[in-house]
Structure formats: C-alpha cells, structure tokens
Image (cartoon, grey):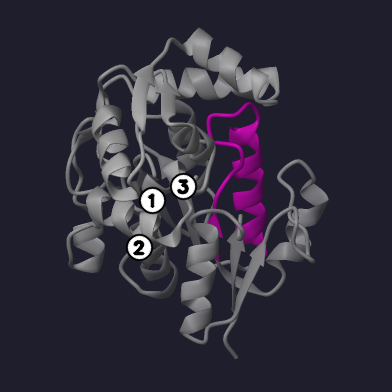
Amino acid sequence: MQKTTVIVGGTGKTGRRVAARLAAQGLPVRAVSRSTALPFDWEEPATWAPALRGAEAVYVTYQPDLAAPGSVEAIGAFARLAAGSGVRRLVLLSGRGEEEARACEREVEACGTDWTILRASWFCQNFSEHHLLGPVLDGVITLPAGTVAEPFVDAEDIADVAVAALTRDGHAGRIHELTGPRLLTFTDAAREIAEAAGRDVRYVPVSPQEYTAGLVEQGVPAGEAAMLAGLFARVLDGRNAHLADGVRRVLGREPRDFTDYAHETAATGVWNA
C-alpha cells in the first residue's frame, strides 16, 4: 500500500503545484493548511499529528516566512514529530541568504529522517499570486531593494524539484539551491511585466521604513510588516545576486526564464486592469 505524501502549505504557491503533480501521477497526497478540511496551523501544534498520520513523505513550507519569530522552534518540533511518526522523507522549502532560514534547515537536518533542502531565490509568482499583484495592477512596485539584481525562480520549477525529492532516490542529505537562468533587477522585471501585459508598470526603490509604513497602511500587522521589510532589505542587498544550478542538476534542463513566466501569466488575464 502506498503511503501518503503530506503537503504542509498545500494551498500556497508551491504547495498546490506540488500536490497537483503528485495527484496527476496517481500518488496519494494530503494537502493541508489552515483552510483545509483537515486543518494544519503552525500556531496550533495539536493540528500537526493528525495531518501527519500515515505519511511517508512531507513537503514543508512555513508561513509567513522562516525569518518570522518562533520559526526555528516550530520547524524543529515539527521535524522531530514527523520523524517519530514514521516519515521517511522531509523536504523543506527554504530561502537563500537568510540566517533564520539556515537555523531552520539545521533543525531539519538533525531530526533523524532523510531530508532535502530546497533553497530558493525570489519567486516569479510573487508578482502575480502574492502581495506584489496589487502594486503591479496599480502600476508601481515599491521594495527596499535598490538596484540589486535577483535570479527570479519560477514556482513551477520549484514544484518539479520538490516532486523529484519527494518521490525519487538520490536527494537525501542534499541542499538544492534553486534560481532562474539569469539576473534581473526589479526595474528589469517591471519592464518585462509591462511589455507582456501591455500596461505601465515601473519599480520605485524605497527605504525599509517607507516599505514598512506602506504595508501597515495596507492592513499588514506592524510586527509582520517590519519583519518582511527587514528580511527584504537583507536578502536583496546583493548577497543573492548570483546563479545556482540546482534546477539543472535535479531536472536535467534549464530553469524557466522570467520572460516566459511574464508572457504566460499575462495570457491568463491576472494583470488586466
């Protein structure tokens, strides 16, 4: 009997893609989040064990981010619970250049089961499925990123790598660093989105303080806004302005380019006024 693969954060950008790929292969999959029938909530540890019941492999994403306070303790406790529940493979979605994320990775590495780390750069889909969709529609993207370049990675590639790590041998004890195929500044990204969508979109760099204030005005809690602004200012300081070959090594092909993402996303109409 095939055991289940659990997707923690199964309604998120990568989680729902991973779940869909596994289901398409006819594999048992259980996608859980705070909104699913069987709920999973990082702030409610009592929900963890029921979600893990019968699981052989687990894909883990953490909300709002691995840089959030309490993430290290939660990831460590969950990883140990998963290992003790009979989980054989644990795949963690992590971030590049984040000290807090590295601490979470170490918790997974020490949990006692086979583990794989997916250390991803900034998602292309942040411009269409997350908090930057509104700014794109408004025509002005503001971030505390200056003129730094980022190797934007497509969530489709992350999902393909995650499925490989969850279902195939050879990934235990590996850290796969995932980026797109080229570096773009946020000015470049805004220009490509504008060209693909046929609308005016530009990027305006702001300070972390200005970005925090803008998030609070949008209704983001002050603590979370400050955490996100500080995280973005750190990881978008140039430390990640280089490419990695994780997608090619795992999948045997080049990662998807931002231009392809922009044109395919524009065709869905999500960037229409």
- The residue carrying mark 2 is 161
- The residue carrying mark 1 is 118
- Residue type pointed to by label 1: Leu
State left or right for residue 34 relative to residue 57. Answer: right
> Badges 2 and 1: C-beta atoms under 8 Å apart?
yes
Residue at figure coordinates x 57%, y 54% from the top left: 12
Residue at figure coordinates x 68%, y 75% from the top left: 54
- Select label 3 or label 2 by which is in front: 3
State left or right for residue 137 relative to residue 154. Answer: right
Give the percent coordinates (x, y) of residue 33: 69, 56
> Badges 1 and 3: C-beta atoms under 8 Å apart?
no
- Residue type pointed to by label 2: Val
- The residue carrying mark 3 is 128
Tag 2: Cα neighbours inside 10 Å, few (<14), some, or many (≥20)? Answer: many
Residue found at the very far bottom of the displayed protein:
1
Give the percent coordinates (x, y) of residue 80: 62, 51
Give the percent coordinates (x, y) of residue 125: 42, 48
Separation of marks 2 and 1 at Cα, in angstroms: 8 Å
Disc 3 is placed on an element classified as: loop
Separation of marks 1 and 3 at Cα, in angstroms: 22 Å
- Residue type pointed to by label 3: Ser
Q: Which residues are magenta?
A: 58-85
Q: Is residue 59 magenta?
A: yes
Place residue 186 in its image quadrant: top left
The mark that comes first in sequence, 1 or 3, is 1
The mark that comes first in sequence, 2 or 1, is 1
- 226 over 164 or under it: above or below: above
Q: Is residue 77 magenta?
A: yes
- 222 over 129 or under it: above or below: above
Tag 1: Cα neighbours inside 10 Å, few (<14), some, or many (≥20)? Answer: many
Residue at figure coordinates x 69%, y 65% from the top left: 52
